[in-house]
């Protein structure tokens, strides 16, 4: 199937002022400013198929926003190529903008002084959405996002959760086929997060909407994304199904054993004892070297085991490992 987004060897070089060390250095750089170049994005490639929900994740400064800004045509790449729905945002920004919806969790595209409904009407004119399409879209969006309760409220009086629902509707008014979400659930309470995740899932299922989501919220990733593209230092460090990324990054499992009485030899050749507290022993083992069942069977032959549990790593462990390991 034809990719909705195709990014090849994308690079964005920023020029920044070089600052000297200490007082002497600071003075010197003030008098003789020197420039240095850094790559905010340093050779990124990926391809996204229609209908995917992809988590674009990575630590602060990894290059996520820089990538999104280039994909939406706000920033010009230093080199590399981008195609969104077959069109280059650099060659024809207007055509690309028509295919995209963008929501920045920290900003709004609604008009502070207008009522929510008036804001939509104004955006309809800016996006040049015909009346019939607009009304059809508003009916669906209003229903799924439950906008009716506050459609006549001035935007400045909306709660953060209401405003975010308004922003999502605004991004979808012109029936885009791709939605970029930069931290869409930041600062929201559990109910509002839930409503927003439901909306994303619903639009994806009903309209085949392709979603690229930047977030630091692990629940967003877990509940929405089937695939993760993990970036760090401007490069893609992982790209694949969420399950295999977790498996790859956290190969260790933990077996916690509780003994009936103290024993001398607790060792096992394929496992490492990482902690011991009274009669409780923590074994760390690699799934590829020994299965939990084998380990339990071996240990129970030599030890009087009273109780045991196996701990699987979760998405939180995996992402912590991603952030630490690169
Ligand atoms: N306008 C700019 N001028 C110079 N350097 C920049 C500029 N914008 C970003 N950078 C640098 O490029 C790198 C990538 O920044 P970017 O904003 O894309 O990160 P991010 O992944 O979005 O991080 P965060 O999770 O904090 O939002 C960082 O090192 C940042 O300092
Ligand atoms: Mg960012």
Image: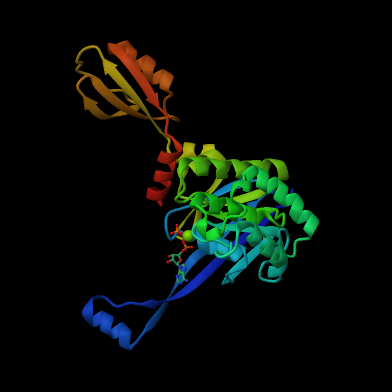
Q: Quadrant of residue 100?
A: bottom right
Residue 137 is left or right of residue 301, and the answer is right
Q: Residue at x 40, y 49 (%)?
A: 323
| Residue 250 image offset from top left, x and y in percent | 42, 38
Between 15 and 238, the one lying in front of the other is: 15
Q: Is residue 272 above or below residue 13?
A: above
| Residue 227 image offset from top left, x and y in percent | 57, 44
| Residue 23 image offset from top left, x and y in percent | 22, 79
Q: Residue at x 76, y 50 (%)?
A: 136
Q: Is residue 27 above or below residue 258?
A: below
Q: Is residue 230 above or below residue 271?
A: below
Q: Quadrant of residue 115?
A: bottom right
| Residue 242 image offset from top left, x and y in percent | 53, 40
Q: Can the viewer see residue 51 in this picture? A: no
Q: Quadrant of residue 117?
A: bottom right
Q: Residue at x 70, y 59 (%)?
A: 99
Residue 74 is left or right of residue 205, and the answer is left
Between 269 and 83, the one lying in front of the other is: 83
Between 178 and 40, the one lying in front of the other is: 178
């Amino acid at each position: 199937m034809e990719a909705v987004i195709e990014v090849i060897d994308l690079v964005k070089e920023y020029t920044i002022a070089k600052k000297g060390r200490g007082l002497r250095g600071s003075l010197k750089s003030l008098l003789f400013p020197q420039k240095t170049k850094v790559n905010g994005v340093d050779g990124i490639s990926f391809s996204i198929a229609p209908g995917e929900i992809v988590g674009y994740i990575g630590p602060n400064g990894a290059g996520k926003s820089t990538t999104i800004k280039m994909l939406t045509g706000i920033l010009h790449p230093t080199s590399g190529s981008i195609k969104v729905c077959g069109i280059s945002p650099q060659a024809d920004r207007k055509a690309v903008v028509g295919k995209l919806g963008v929501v920045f969790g920290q900003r709004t595209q609604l008009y502070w002084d207008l009522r929510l409904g008036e804001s939509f009407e104004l955006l309809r004119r800016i996006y040049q959405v015909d009346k019939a399409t607009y009304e059809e879209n508003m009916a669906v969006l209003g229903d799924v996002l439950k906008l009716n309760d506050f459609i006549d409220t001035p935007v400045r009086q909306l709660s953060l959760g209401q405003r975010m629902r308004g922003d999502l509707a605004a991004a979808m008014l012109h029936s885009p086929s791709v939605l970029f979400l930069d931290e869409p659930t930041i600062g929201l309470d559990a109910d509002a997060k839930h409503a927003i995740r439901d909306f994303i899932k619903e639009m994806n299922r009903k309209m085949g909407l392709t979603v690229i989501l930047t977030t630091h919220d692990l629940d967003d990733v877990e509940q929405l994304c089937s695939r993760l593209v993990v970036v760090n230092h401007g490069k893609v460090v992982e790209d694949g199904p969420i399950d295999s990324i977790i498996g790859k990054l956290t190969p260790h499992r933990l077996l916690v054993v509780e003994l009936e009485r103290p024993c001398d030899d607790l060792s096992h050749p394929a496992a490492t004892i990482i902690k011991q507290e009274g009669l409780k022993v923590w074994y760390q083992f690699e799934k590829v070297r020994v299965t939990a069942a084998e380990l339990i069977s071996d240990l129970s032959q030599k030890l009087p085991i009273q109780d045991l549990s196996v701990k699987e790593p979760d998405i939180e462990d995996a992402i912590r490992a991603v952030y630490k390991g690169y």
